[in-house]
Image: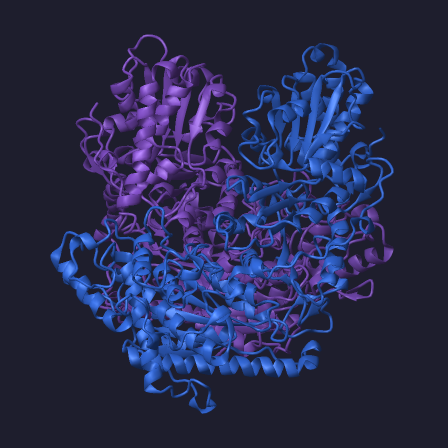
Chain colours: A blue, B purple
Amino acid sequence: MPDAPTTTGSPDSSTGSPGSGLGDDRIRALDAHWRAANYLAAGQIYLLANPLLTEPLRPDHIKPRLLGHWGTSPGLNLVHTHLNRVIKDRDLDAICVWGPGHGGPAVLAGSWLDGSYSEIYPDVSRDAAGIARLFRQFSFPGGVPSHVAPETPGSIHEGGELGYSLAHAYGAALDNPGLLVACVIGDGEAETGPLAGSWHANKFLDPVHDGAVLPILHLNGYKIANPTVFARLPRPELDELLRGYGHEPIHVSGDEPLEVHRAMAHALDEALDRIALLQRTAREERTARQKGLAERPRWPVIVLRTPKGWTGPEVVDGLPVEGTWRAHQVPLPGVRENPEHLRQLERWLRSYRPEELFDADGRPRPHLLAEVPEGDRRLGANPHANGGLLLRSLPLPDLERYAVPVDKPGATLHEPTRVLGGLLEKVMADTGARRDFRVVGPDETASNRLEALFRTTGKAWQEAVLPTDEHLSRSGRVMEILSEHLCQGWLEGYLLTGRHGLFSCYEAFVHIVDSMVNQHIKWLKVSRSLPWRRPVASLNYLLTSHVWRQDHNGFSHQDPGFVDHVLNKSPEVVRVYLPPDANTLLSVADHILRTRDYVNVVVAGKQPCFDWLDLDQARAHCARGAGTWDWAGTENGAGEPDVVLAGAGDVPTQEVVAAAGILRRHLPDVAVRVVNVVDMTRLLPKEEHPHGMPDHEFDALFTRDRPVIFAYHGYPWLVHRLSYRRAVHPHLHVRGYKEMGTTTTPFDMVVRNDLDRYRLVMDVIDRTPGLAARAVAVRQRMQDARTRHHAWIREHGTDMPEVAEWSWTG
Amino acid sequence: MPDAPTTTGSPDSSTGSPGSGLGDDRIRALDAHWRAANYLAAGQIYLLANPLLTEPLRPDHIKPRLLGHWGTSPGLNLVHTHLNRVIKDRDLDAICVWGPGHGGPAVLAGSWLDGSYSEIYPDVSRDAAGIARLFRQFSFPGGVPSHVAPETPGSIHEGGELGYSLAHAYGAALDNPGLLVACVIGDGEAETGPLAGSWHANKFLDPVHDGAVLPILHLNGYKIANPTVFARLPRPELDELLRGYGHEPIHVSGDEPLEVHRAMAHALDEALDRIALLQRTAREERTARQKGLAERPRWPVIVLRTPKGWTGPEVVDGLPVEGTWRAHQVPLPGVRENPEHLRQLERWLRSYRPEELFDADGRPRPHLLAEVPEGDRRLGANPHANGGLLLRSLPLPDLERYAVPVDKPGATLHEPTRVLGGLLEKVMADTGARRDFRVVGPDETASNRLEALFRTTGKAWQEAVLPTDEHLSRSGRVMEILSEHLCQGWLEGYLLTGRHGLFSCYEAFVHIVDSMVNQHIKWLKVSRSLPWRRPVASLNYLLTSHVWRQDHNGFSHQDPGFVDHVLNKSPEVVRVYLPPDANTLLSVADHILRTRDYVNVVVAGKQPCFDWLDLDQARAHCARGAGTWDWAGTENGAGEPDVVLAGAGDVPTQEVVAAAGILRRHLPDVAVRVVNVVDMTRLLPKEEHPHGMPDHEFDALFTRDRPVIFAYHGYPWLVHRLSYRRAVHPHLHVRGYKEMGTTTTPFDMVVRNDLDRYRLVMDVIDRTPGLAARAVAVRQRMQDARTRHHAWIREHGTDMPEVAEWSWTG
């Protein structure tokens, strides 16, 4: 081990807590449990048969493909063993987030030992037959994944992609004042940016209304092929870092099991005593805290330093393995072919003395279960880790109170997200006692016009509050930090433990969490296939400050591609909505807040936007997901139109309606159908997405053979990718964002990307058979308007009056 | 300001450095420069005319749209002013990364004042006419962006998206031992995960071969609407944090300009003295360092605490603005309409005493330029910030030495990335003296089979080195940390300062940097349009450990969508290659390492893969980007084939060739054309991408009307999105990854996603006109093979011998 650590922890022993000075018999029981877990973890990686080593190990007992991660497993097992003890001693309501989720064998072992695994999967019984199945299924085709996964009881965290454990832990602890969330952070994961930023989540955790997070930084020294930064920090520097993060470190280190058990028991008691004291103090002083006077608690962190691959082979083929990166995955790779490896494996497995751990029927002997809690207290069975069990539907108010009146389309303007803010305020108020709804975002709730929320709650904040500050609150349920990673991680943890929420984000910068949402979608996809995992509330994105209205921030803030990213993922899970105005946004929001197990992406503007539909119309339109706006078109009701002008998104819709107005005035005999799409997945074939339109419906809406000019909010090819199988596809012409961005006016943005009303009219003229010849003058007029626009903005820096003052006049 | 900071810094004054005790006249010169920069920054936000306030301010002097960020600008100006002084005093070679890049007006002001702006943009001259243009163009249509951008002289960092400044700064400093990279980090940006993780970059910076990074943490207290976490940390906790990050903090704080100038001058001298000492010591002790004995230096960090919107309006409409979040953007929003706002603006602008700063012709008066350096030493003119000026072509060896011999296709196996490793080793060796090539990756260089690199260099590491460690080196040019953000940020900074590199990454987890690559592509797109920005080396991704061979890590590690993400971006910049074997990978690598201003994405496997082409064939194939593999097909050379079987990617190519073999054996009379695509952008229309194929070429390759069965590496709809305009598109049927992933065998992965050879043969039978009826038996045989597969893996956990032992027999 690096820089000669002490071999025991040095917690303050004056606390007299339950675990201080555990008797030798209890330490031995803990050790037996740990040995059993280590045996089961190694067995999962290696054994296809002979699971209890009742006969000498032979090559044919070994799996043909050796897969799994041994290195982190003994450390995870140690944590599991000791959490069991304190949960039982203190009757704790606790879950654990296993950051090194690649150590799947360990977490599976713990859950098999506490019996929760067999309750969920009865064929993997807590006996010899069950051990055999547990071993065989691991990382085996048709079995269970090698990592912690939705299939793993007691988990809300996959851990395959590193960086999010601590954010998930904090999300789980929010509004769960009675819950302890332990969180194992590997020293590999600790190097990631998202994890590094997550340490500051303690500035947002209210010791009164929220539970506690106990980070356990596991320094096993190496990642795949390198030492870790954290393990090689000199200890004083590491302590400064952790104190700088607002934590008080408690160290446990060593490689002699019984000493480490004693130190770990002591450290956990010390940490839990401190947490209890901090919570009690804060809850007694809550008045002072509400006034911002009480100090932010300095929560404990446990630093656990044990060798990578501890208790595994020390040396293999002459090279050191235990305590090095070589223990990361499978320390003995050649067991089936190499007799010496086979011998080493047998020696290793027998070193746990399985005959002491399991009876003749393969059942764990009672002494090793002595410190394991029961029922819902077990880490594998705590309902917080299967949040759907605890989920209650949100109280959603009647939308009538929040809708804007619309007597005729396009005559009034509202900021859609501000209208939504009214609805969210009510939801926030009506969950004031339940505390199961939060809004997260990177410092943009007010900028995104959702500040009505602050009439009923504040922004969570545990640092000093100054007189000039506004809306900060110890117990606020709006979470703002300039980290999309932390917002996403908090919300995921919050939802997976059975609550509700919304993430409001800049459209361009939600790409920062592309990879996180991938994992959440994968989690939901698998969860949906597991009957015991109850549905959780959907992860709802409100993407605003969108591409078309980043005229002041410019090119770097313009990216509509998150929709494309999400639509690559499992169709059972993903939904995308582009409400064109305030009432449709309300209707969409009302819907998504009722859904379960989805990722809903809503793109909506915060700038003033014409109101097109009243609430009833909006509801009907959103229920269909796509429909004709007869009032904007010029069809006479008989037969098919000459051309379809379709739009999706608030800005494209405005341009489409404006183009329809121009056509109505200047080419009134052209039968134009105006179509608006709210739910993008309706464009997909029915076979490809649950919301996909059947062909006959699609054909009825878009025709089979008329030109379709489609103005889309994002990258134009997405519409092609969704609709290429449709009959009308050869006639489909899509306009959208094509990376022609800069700092400019709103209308110049659409002109630069050929999405403006004049260009759309030209597209109609160019693509409607027979129209070009008789519309030469109108086309020229469009061209002139674009020329006029260019001259005007260059001169004035604003949009020309005919655009800035435009409204729909029918 | 929070928690009553001291108003001056407290650097150790015993160093007797050049700036200690600057005379009052020099302080006044610095203050004059700072006032001028503040005036110019505010003027850019507000003024359309009357730039020197030669007449009373009227509404028509004011811009119609007030855009820009004032809040951070005075702080950035302070840093710029003081960096000028130390650069000149010490003849430093220095650049600055401006993290709060939204403070564009400040950086533009600094560059206009040092004259570099006018040299690049002569119409924005350093006189009254130039000031007028500088003001008007800012955030004005057709002008310059409101943020720091490629258009900004002296910048390598956009700053619109927050989080990457420190990583960029480190990337710039690597292998530039004479360079100082100052880096302003806003306290908003400091909250992001990527920035939080970047502090540990100092564990990878070699004081001997690399330059120095001087972080300047600017605590202005607020972000858009909230206080910042860092500004509200109690100072002892902040100091612990920074020390824990391995830095020694030097504080400067206050709001009285002359005092802050003195403190800042002192702090910079202190920091630079310390840096010089640390470098000198390390360079004298280099032998000890190479042995790992010398301690890692504790580099200084400056903590600069000044009010947000400092020197701007204190109170507007009765609410405090200076020193609060309300100063973030435009502190006086109603200047054109509100006479009181107009009066306040005039008072504010005149408070800088412009008549003292500019002469009658609008030229900066000499005294305020007294501390400004000249020539290439100016921050706006340092060639490191226009890296193409310094770029040298890489020495690339003859590929013959590294290519694998291929006598006939599909008879031998090689790991393509291992073959590439040989080439990279040579490049690394041949740049040993120049030190302008680095390979970055999250702990996977060896796992990705590139370990040949370690024969010529090591992994950069400044922490303790233990006897068991391998390949660690103080001066290594492979950079490994478990942070894709840091890898990406390092490489971007390295490339933009004129060097070369490669990022090898897990395919699934490169999504972690989706948003970073967006910004880099945008940077390159704009740079390409600026003649003064010289081309830089391309950003090269090697995505390996790809979706089809994550059979052991499972679903969380399976995502081929980065290609989709990148292909949404500017076609001038993006390139995507899927070499199907070792020699094609070599040829692609040779090409991309020669290119400039691109983002090249290469997806290639690390597992044993059949060799299909010898080097000459590989070169020809890659040059075409897509072509027919006659040896695999059954065309007789006359007329068109009955069906086209196309593949892109190593695993799909193997399945395509295997399917072609089955067809050749069982349906020899069907004329099958086998097509392989290396360069995905060739599928695009010529008008959409520089590599796009003209229609006649596409039609000649894929036919216009024959069924095309396309086995693609990633999401199948990407191929449709690229080719929907082609004549053959209605006949195109694509197989690819459709999120059917888990822990299983390699062949089961392709079966689960319907990409396997048997499924492809069935597709051919089903879609080739007239074939279904006469191929019933063959189709059944394929179905049987799939059934056999399912039974076999469930029983054995491996792929059945007919698959595992398959090879192409022609």
- Res. A272 visible in picture: yes
B86 or A653, which lies in front?
A653
Q: Position of residue A807 (x, y in %)?
A: 82, 34
Task: Say left or right for B361 vs B212.
Answer: right
Picture quarter with the N terminus of chain B: bottom right
Q: Residue furthest front?
A: A361
Residue drawn at 68 percent across, 33 percent down? A626
Q: Position of residue A631 (x, y in %)?
A: 81, 28
| Left or right for B238, reference A502 | left
Please identify the residue farthest to the top as the structure is shown.
Answer: B638
On the picture, is A155 further left or further right than A76? right
Give x and y (percent) for residue A709: 66, 24
Horizontal and vertical percent position of residue A371 = 40, 77
Circle count: 0
What residue appears at the point 82 percent right and 62 percent down from the top-left corner? B317
Q: Is residue B750 positioned above or below B363 on the image? A: above
Q: In the rendered view of the protein, which quadrant contains the C terminus of chain B? A: top left
Q: Is residue B485 above or below residue A777?
A: below
Residue B268 visible to the viewer:
no
Quadrant position of residue A786:
top right
B373 or B784, nearer to the observer: B784
B382 in relation to A294, above or below? above
